[in-house]
């Protein structure tokens, strides 16, 4: 494997998900029990974004109530990264056919450690972490 390989082999296609109305407590419980650093956020069956450990840490450090605070209160904006490095986004999204090299550049530009990855049929969504990408690079 190398920098030009597609990221689809690094994606967790079974990534756990939470809803927009899930409480901060529920999100923490799901993240811990799933042993992952990010969760897909869905509204019905539509992907709304990605929450990560850092989003939770920020909410907790800002003294957000574990039961009253909902995902909608702390969900960062998510955008498709097109190469414009002038702004950082806490959530980045790429297509599964993108290269490992491009994914690493996007993670660096966005200032995050997790990517939302859309599958070939545009309905499948997973998460690729920097660790997953580095493992793929070395395999």
Image (cartoon, rainbow, N blue to C red):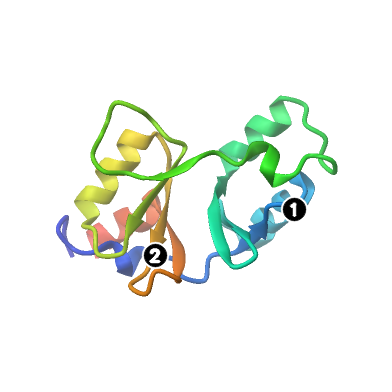
**Spot occupied by residue 81 in the image (x, y as percentages of width and height):** 32, 44
Task: Give the label on residue 11, or none.
Answer: 2
Question: What residue is rendered at 37% in x and 49% in y?
Answer: 130
Mark nearest the camera among 1 and 2 is 1
- Secondary structure category for the residue under label 2: loop
Question: What residue is rendered at 35% in x and 64% in y?
Answer: 10
Lateral position of residue 40 relative to residue 133, left or right: right
Image quadrant assignment for residue 126 = bottom left
Vertical comparison of 11 with 64: above or below: below
Query: Viewer-proximal residue, 53 or 22?
Result: 22
Question: Disc 1 marks which residue?
Answer: 22
Q: Quadrant of the C terminus?
A: bottom left
Vertical comparison of 24 with 7: above or below: above
Question: What residue is rendered at 39% in x and 34% in y?
Answer: 111
Query: Viewer-proximal residue, 133 or 22?
Result: 22
- How far apart are the two marked residues, 1 and 2, measured between alpha carbons? 24 Å
Lateral position of residue 94 relative to residue 75, left or right: left
Vertical comparison of 99 with 90: above or below: below
- Secondary structure category for the residue under label 1: loop
Lateral position of residue 92 relative to residue 21, left or right: left
**Spot occupied by residue 64 in the image (x, y as percentages of width and height):** 77, 31
């Amino acid at each position: 494997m190398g920098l030009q390989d597609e990221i689809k082999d690094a994606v967790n296609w079974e990534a756990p998900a939470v809803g927009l109305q899930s409480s901060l407590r529920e999100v923490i419980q799901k993240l811990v029990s799933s042993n992952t650093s990010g969760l897909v956020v869905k509204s019905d069956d539509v992907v709304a974004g990605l929450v990560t450990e850092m989003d939770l840490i920020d909410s907790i450090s800002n003294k957000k109530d574990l039961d009253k605070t909902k995902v909608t209160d702390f969900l960062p904006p998510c955008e498709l990264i097109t190469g414009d490095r002038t702004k950082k986004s806490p959530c980045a999204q790429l297509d599964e056919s993108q290269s490992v090299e491009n994914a690493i550049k996007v993670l660096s530009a966005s200032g995050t450690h997790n990517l939302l990855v859309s599958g070939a049929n545009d309905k499948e969504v997973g998460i690729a972490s920097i660790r997953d990408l580095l493992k793929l690079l070395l395999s």
